[in-house]
Amino acid sequence: MGLRDSDADVRSRTKVEKSDRELVVTRSFDAPARILFEAWTKPELFMRWWAPKSMGMPLYSCEMDVRVGGKYRIEFGHDAANTWAFFGQYIEVIPNARIVWTNEEGEDGAVTTVTFEEVDGKTLLTFSELYPSKEAFEEGGGILPEQLDQLDELLASLTGDQ
Amino acid sequence: MVQFASACLDASFSALADATRRGILEQLGRAEASITDLADKFHMTLTGMKKHVSVLEKAGFVTTEKVGRVRTCKLGLRDLTAEAAWIENYRQLWDARFDELDKVVEELKLKERMDGPER
């Protein structure tokens, strides 16, 4: 069925690459860079897509002052008493091309870079989170080797080659 | 904000925390099966089995394909390692996010077209 094909195409458009201390996500959008930049920098637009339903937690609030030295604060949660906040500041802002910000909610936070590369009216979006060290990445990202090993053992016992 | 991805890893663990779901994986490790087959085998309602399969599917352990009226389930990524599952979960989060972003982008494009070219 044609529908299934297009579903598969859409799904494969989002790519993730991981290295020792960085995660990079890319996807191409059928729109000029200025439109993507707008959707990333206006809180009322940003709030509409940053917390998809499947994430299981809605955005509670979002403030962003997108200019070099400006701050942002994003809170997830269902009510004011239980929120999970992310905050930091913008260290580089090039309209319609590039935004770089810090993540200051924990020690050794990542530096996030989003770039918009427009070619023939389409835009390649690259989102990268770079941690200061491998250890910071594992802790900040929750990719703890012991936990992964544990999960691997469990998987092997369930589905291993019998 | 990779922290949110750690919530995804938790999803992998909680998917496997349930004995029925572990049983489903074992079963699918032997052969593919339809939701109906699985529901019969585990003495469950179709709705109940659909829920379990959907949890396993979201965590990347199972894939399903609907042919006609039958939905067939099989093990997700054959050589699934926990890291591969983690990355797939993270990718799915971004995929969902970008699908929502696509909707906002389409709306902005439409608005731009209606407002006419920039002068």
Image (cartoon, coloured by chain):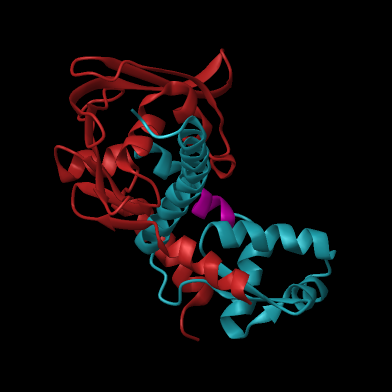
Chain colours: A red, B cyan
Of residue B71 and residue B78, the one placed in the foreground of this image is B71
Where does residue B97 sit, x and y in percent of width and height? 47, 44
Where does residue B118 sit, x and y in percent of width and height? 36, 30
Magenta stretch: give its range: B11-15
Of residue A126 and residue A142, the one placed in the foreground of this image is A126
Q: Is residue B19 visible?
A: no
Of residue B36 and residue A118, the one placed in the foreground of this image is A118
User: Residue A73: within the magenta?
Assistant: no
Q: Is residue B74 visible?
A: yes
As drawn, A143 above or below A156 = above
Where does residue A1 sit, x and y in percent of width and height? 63, 77
Q: Residue at x 56, y 57 (%)?
A: B58
Q: Residue at x 59, y 40 (%)?
A: A53
As drawn, B39 above or below A95 = below
Q: Residue at x 50, y 20 (%)?
A: A83
As drawn, A69 above or below A1 = above
Q: Main secondary structure of the magenta part?
A: helix
Q: Quadrant of residue A7?
A: bottom right
Total number of numbered labels?
Answer: 0
Residue at the outermost left position: A132
Where does residue B63 sit, x and y in percent of width and height? 57, 70
Image side of residue A129 versus residue B63, left or right: left
Q: Residue at x 61, y 66 (%)?
A: B22
Image side of residue B101 versus residue A96, left or right: right
